[in-house]
Image (tube, rainbow, N blue to C red):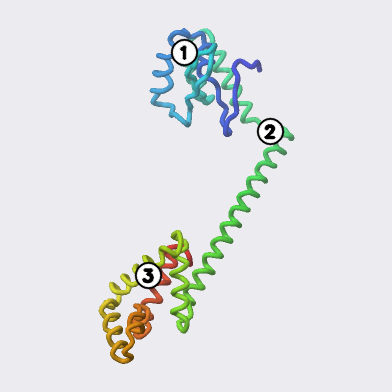
Amino acid sequence: MSNLINIQNQDGKKLVSARDLYIGLGLAKDQWSRWYKKNIQDNEYFKENYDFTGVRHNVEGNEVQDFAITLEFAKHIAMMARTEKSHEYRNYFIECEQQLKQPMCLEDLIIANAKALKDAREQAEKAQATALEVKQEVQAMRDVVTLDPAAWRTETTNLVNRIAQKLGGNENIQAIRKESYDILDSRAKAKLGIRQTNMKRKVLEETGSTSKSNKVSKLDVIAADARLREVYIAIVKEMAIKYGVA
């Protein structure tokens, strides 16, 4: 089979130059720009980025529009051109398609199998890496779920700090704390601000120490109420999972 037109192999597709085919069919060179718009770009049966892709070439110092088209599209163009070369090109593309369907030689089979094995190995490695990540995430979630209630204050604080670090640094700790308290107020009707004020007043009355009173935090309020502790622990766990530190 003579090499009537250059055929390129790209991403498993056999492609030819639409402009080379146009010239080879003996169509008028000065009508190329008008022709490709109607017969390629506006063709309702062949789609861009599937049957053809626009490319540009430098021809004698001038940039020229061209298209890389599939053999099926090229065969269609050859048949529709109806020039003296139409049947020659059509038959050439049919013969090319038939060759593609023929069994590969031993060398091609070895290359194809080697590529398939390489692809399979890469997919297996990716799957293994993904499985490891999932396993680590699951273990981290288990660690959160099994948070020790006896050490709830330390462990919830650690989770809040980890969330803050995930979001950019310690400057986010206050915002994360506020979010957790706001959720607790909403979910448990806790009224933490009022309870904190009342607890500060009580500490001041009992100890007479302003410094001790000022140190009373919302965590102290939560610590004094078993129900609030339970709800707060659940909230911080949920936030850890939400922010991806679980």
Residue positioned 43% across, 17% down in the render: 36
**Closer to the N terminus: mark 2 or mark 3?**
2
Q: Is residue 241 left or right of residue 198?
A: right
Specify the amino acid type for callout 2. Met
* Label ID, residue 177: 3
Specify the amino acid type for callout 1. Ala
- Is disc 1 in contact with disc 3, using a CB cutoff of under 8 Å? no
What distance separates the C-alpha of mark 1 from that of mark 3?
A: 74 Å
Specify the amino acid type for callout 3. Arg
The answer to whether 18 is drawn above or below residue 121 in the figure is above
What distance separates the C-alpha of mark 2 from that of mark 1?
A: 33 Å
* Label ID, residue 104: 2
The answer to whether 229 is drawn above or below residue 65 in the figure is below
Identify the residue under disc 1: 81
* Label 2: few (<14), some (14–19) or many (≥20) C-alpha neighbours in 10 Å: few
76 and 178: which one is in front?
A: 178
What distance separates the C-alpha of mark 2 from that of mark 3?
A: 66 Å
155 and 59: which one is in front?
A: 155
**Closer to the N terminus: mark 1 or mark 3?**
1
Question: Residue 92, position in %: x, y?
Answer: 59, 18
